[in-house]
Image: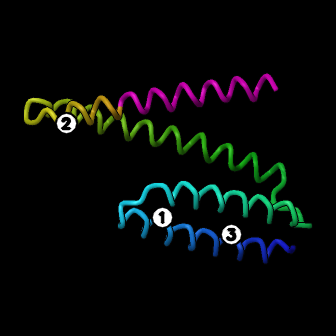
Amino acid sequence: MSLKRFKLVKILVVIALAITVSQSILYNNYIIPIFAVAVSFALLMSCKRRVKEVIADERDYEIGGKAARVAIQIFSWIAVVIMFVLYSYRDASSVYEGIALTLAYSVCFLMILYSALFYFFNKK
């Protein structure tokens, strides 16, 4: 399989998955999306193994790593600012406090996960 054909298959699988998931959620069926994601993943992994060309090289992985690091930093800063704003309005509605704390714990979990994965891959 060529890289061009793999990219086309990938786009078609994503479109089919999006349609399947959205229709399933509209009909309140949450089992089908899980099954559809698993089938799509298996299909894409099967197709990826058949590609004869180079899909990505070390430079692509390095750029992807830098982009992921910067995206995590930007998301964390924006989430912390939003968390402080929502927490300052906790007297207006108790919902704001819950959202702010959920956001704060999510950012903490993201940072801990990033640090753990970085430590793991650095040791490897």
In the rendered image, residue 14, in percent from the top left (x then y), is placed at 59, 68
Q: Could you tell me which secondary element the residue under label 1 belongs to?
A: helix
Q: Position of residue 10 (x, y in %)?
A: 68, 69
Q: Mark 1: give few (<14), some (14-19) or many (20+) Cα within 10 Å.
A: many
Task: Identify which amino acid the numbered label 1 is placed on.
Answer: Val
Q: Which numbered circle lies on residue 21?
A: 1
x and y percentages locating residue 5 in the rendered image: 78, 77
On the image, which quarter does residue 41 sit in?
bottom right
Which is more foreground, mark 3 or mark 1? 1
Q: Quadrant of residue 15?
A: bottom right
Judging from the image, what secondary structure is the residue with disc 2 in? helix
Q: Is the residue marked by circle 2 packed among few (<14), some (14-19), or many (20+) residues within 10 Å?
A: some
Q: Residue 42, image x and y in percent? A: 72, 58
Q: Amino acid at mark 3?
A: Lys
State which tag comes first along the sequence, 2 or 1.
1
Distance between the Cα atoms at labels 2 and 1? Answer: 30 Å
Q: Is residue 113 magenta?
A: yes
SS for callout 3: helix
**Quadrant in which residue 26 is drawn:** bottom left
Residue placed at 42% from the left, 70% from the top? 23
Magenta residues (range):
104-124
Residue occupying image coordinates x 43% and y 65%: 24
Residue receiving disc 3: 10
